[in-house]
Every structure is written in structure tokens, then in C-alpha cells.
Image (cartoon, rainbow, N blue to C red):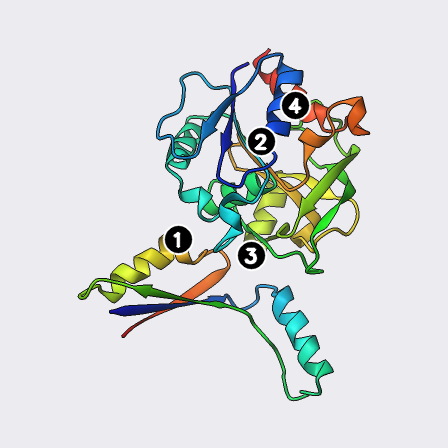
């Protein structure tokens, strides 16, 4: 499985994500710098890591979303290549328009950094099919701008079309309808605020994030 | 010449920062405040002849997130 992790100035979860991908897929991912304007051929997954790209200036993810590589990522997503955005990566995906909604300042205004419980809402995505529907998993969050908001019509559509992938099973950041992760209508782009790459090995204190990466292997198998 | 872009949250979008500031103002005794909304002002130094439409395009492409924000352009 050929994977790539996009690195922006200020990304800081890129290494953890690369290690997680290598552990699960058995193949080291490529690291792609943000100002690259072409993608390698034959990628099975493009992943955008957490962090504080461009210092979160203007809006979280706003400047990274306009990086040269993102034009290629949008094109690849349009061809059906799976794209995963975690935390700041999710913010970047909403800023590109690949995913709906926006991630605003947490309702409590605090940076929230702790383990949270999540419900796997749908397993009908390439990223969640190794989980059980309704499964409750423990994944850490670490963000200041994770408050997912969209207009009521968009939220209704996301729920009706099964595009809500993960919901918080406890209060975390004020997100509309407790949404923690969404997929696009084609289901090949997932963004989520929690960090599955931080719970992949027993030494992490949990392995509930591992199935997200294993789900992608199932698709390719 | 200068262009000023004022970015504000759309009506109805939850503004936790505005709410916190509102509470703080109340704590200072300013009971007459009904609501607070936080936005931002971006000042651009642009070439003479730059049009409002061009600055508007900058706002739509980058300066504002049209999902949650509105903007207003002033040229001076």
C-alpha cells in the first residue's frame, strides 16, 4: 500500500502518522512537502497530519489549504483516491472545500487535550469498515479549533446521507450534533479531529485507532 | 492605496469568543450590552487602481471563509 503524508510548515503530527502508517501497512509512507506541485503516481492514500500549519494564522488550515500541493490533492480526491485529514488536516480539508462545514474555536475556549470516547457512526466508509457499527472507542484529542459547525441544512444532509463517521460520546468542544468526523459524499475523503495515529500500539496506552488504518488495508486487499 | 477588508461571522454562527467577552463586559458592570460578535480587520497595501472586485476576490479565495463568515471591502 503506497501512502503519502503531506507536511506543511508547522505540522507536528506528521512523524506519528508516518510511523502509524508504516506499522499497519508494512510500508514506509512518502513525506511530501507542501510546495510540491505534483503527486507521485499510484498513491493509495494521501494523509494530512495534525499540527499548527502556518501558525494557525488567519484561520486554522486556511493558508495550508491554498498550498500548491493541495490543488493536486483536490484533483486526486476527485479521481477517488482516499484522503485522510486528522485534526489540522481536517481543518485544511474543510478550507479546501473537500469537506463541508468549518472548525471553529472550541465552545469552552480552552485547548482540549485528553482521551475522549467516540461512537463509530457508520462503517460504510473505506476508513471505518474494520470497526463495528455503533462501537465506542477511545481516541485522544488535542485541539483549540475543533468545534464543527455547518448550517442546519448541511448537518441534516450529512446525517441523512450517512456522512457522519464519528460522533463524540461525551461533551468535548461544542461541535454541532457532536460531530467528530465526516466524509464527503463520495466517501473517499475523511476528516476527524481526534488522533487515531496516537493509539495504534499497546505502548500508546490504547489501540483503538489502529482499525482506521486497517480499514484502508481491507479496501485494497 | 489601502484596502480594508472587514471579516465578520455570519448571523447565527455561534461565537464563543464574543460570548466570553460579553460575560467579561457584564462583569465590569456594562449591563447595557446585548450581544458581542468578534471579527477581524485586514488592511492591505495595494497597487493604485486596484478595484473593489479584485479585493473581493481575495476575500472570497482566502481572507474569509464563506461557510461561516461575511466580508466588507473599503478602498481608501
Examine the rendered structure and indicate whether residue B35 appears above or below residue A21.
below
Can residue B14 be seen by looking at this rendering?
A: yes
Helix or strand or loop: what does disc 2 sit on?
Answer: helix
- Of the residues tagged 1 and 4, which is closer to the observer? 4
Pointer 2: what residue?
A14
Q: Which mark is residue A151?
A: 3
Q: CA distance from mark 3 to mark 2?
A: 31 Å
- Of the residues tagged 4 and 2, which is closer to the observer? 2
Examine the rendered structure and indicate whether residue A101 appears above or below residue A85.
below
Whether marks 1 and 4 lie on the same chain: no
Q: Are marks 3 and 4 in contact (CB under 8 Å)?
A: no
Q: CA distance from mark 1 to mark 4?
A: 33 Å
Helix or strand or loop: what does disc 4 sit on?
Answer: helix
Whether marks 3 and 2 lie on the same chain: yes
Quadrant position of the N terminus of chain A in the picture: top right
- Of the residues tagged 3 and 4, which is closer to the observer? 4
Whether marks 2 and 1 lie on the same chain: no
Q: Which mark is residue A20?
A: 4
- Of the residues tagged 1 and 3, which is closer to the observer? 1
Q: Is residue A96 left or right of residue A132?
A: left
Helix or strand or loop: what does disc 3 sit on?
Answer: loop
Crowding at dot 1, Cα within 10 Å, few <14 / some 14-19 / many 20+, comes out as some
Q: Quadrant of residue B55?
A: bottom left
Q: CA distance from mark 4 to mark 2?
A: 10 Å
Q: CA distance from mark 2 to mark 1?
A: 25 Å
Helix or strand or loop: what does disc 1 sit on?
Answer: helix
Q: Is residue A203 left or right of residue A2?
A: right
Pointer 1: what residue?
B62
Whether marks 1 and 3 lie on the same chain: no
Question: Chain for mark 1?
Answer: B
Amino acid at each position: 500500500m503506497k501512502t503519502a503524508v503531506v507536511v506543511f510548515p508547522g505540522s507536528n503530527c506528521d512523524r506519528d502518522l508516518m510511523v502509524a502508517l508504516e506499522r499497519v501497512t508494512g510500508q514506509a509512507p512518502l513525506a511530501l512537502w507542501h510546495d510540491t506541485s505534483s503527486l507521485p503516481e499510484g498513491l493509495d492514500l494521501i494523509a494530512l497530519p495534525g499540527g499548527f500549519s502556518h501558525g494557525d494564522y488567519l484561520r486554522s488550515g486556511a493558508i495550508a489549504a491554498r498550498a500548491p500541493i493541495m490543488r493536486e490533492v483536490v484533483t486526486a480526491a476527485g479521481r477517488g483516491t482516499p484522503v485522510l485529514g486528522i485534526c489540522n488536516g481536517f481543518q485544511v480539508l474543510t478550507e479546501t472545500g473537500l469537506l463541508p462545514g468549518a472548525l471553529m474555536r472550541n465552545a469552552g475556549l480552552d485547548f482540549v487535550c485528553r482521551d475522549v470516547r467516540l461512537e463509530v457512526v457508520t462503517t460504510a466508509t473505506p476508513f471505518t469498515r474494520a470497526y463495528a457499527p455503533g462501537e465506542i472507542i477511545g481516541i485522544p484529542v488535542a485541539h483549540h479549533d475543533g468545534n464543527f459547525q455547518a448550517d442546519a441544512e448541511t448537518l441534516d444532509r450529512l446525517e441523512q446521507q450517512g456522512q457522519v463517521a464519528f460522533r463524540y460520546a461525551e461533551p468535548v468542544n461544542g461541535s454541532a450534533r457532536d460531530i467528530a468526523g465526516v466524509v464527503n459524499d463520495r466517501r473517499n475523503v475523511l476528516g476527524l479531529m481526534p488522533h487515531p495515529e496516537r493509539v495504534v500500539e499497546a505502548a500508546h496506552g490504547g489501540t483503538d485507532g489502529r482499525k482506521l488504518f486497517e480499514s484502508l488495508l481491507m479496501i485494497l486487499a | 492605496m489601502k484596502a480594508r477588508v472587514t471579516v465578520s461571522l455570519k448571523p447565527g454562527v455561534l461565537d464563543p469568543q464574543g460570548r466570553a467577552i460579553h460575560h467579561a463586559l457584564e462583569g465590569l458592570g456594562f449591563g447595557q450590552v446585548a450581544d458581542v460578535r468578534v471579527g477581524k480587520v485586514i488592511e492591505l497595501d495595494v497597487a493604485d487602481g486596484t478595484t473593489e472586485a479584485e479585493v473581493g476576490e481575495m476575500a472570497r479565495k482566502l481572507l474569509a471563509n464563506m461557510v461561516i463568515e461575511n466580508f466588507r471591502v473599503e478602498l481608501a
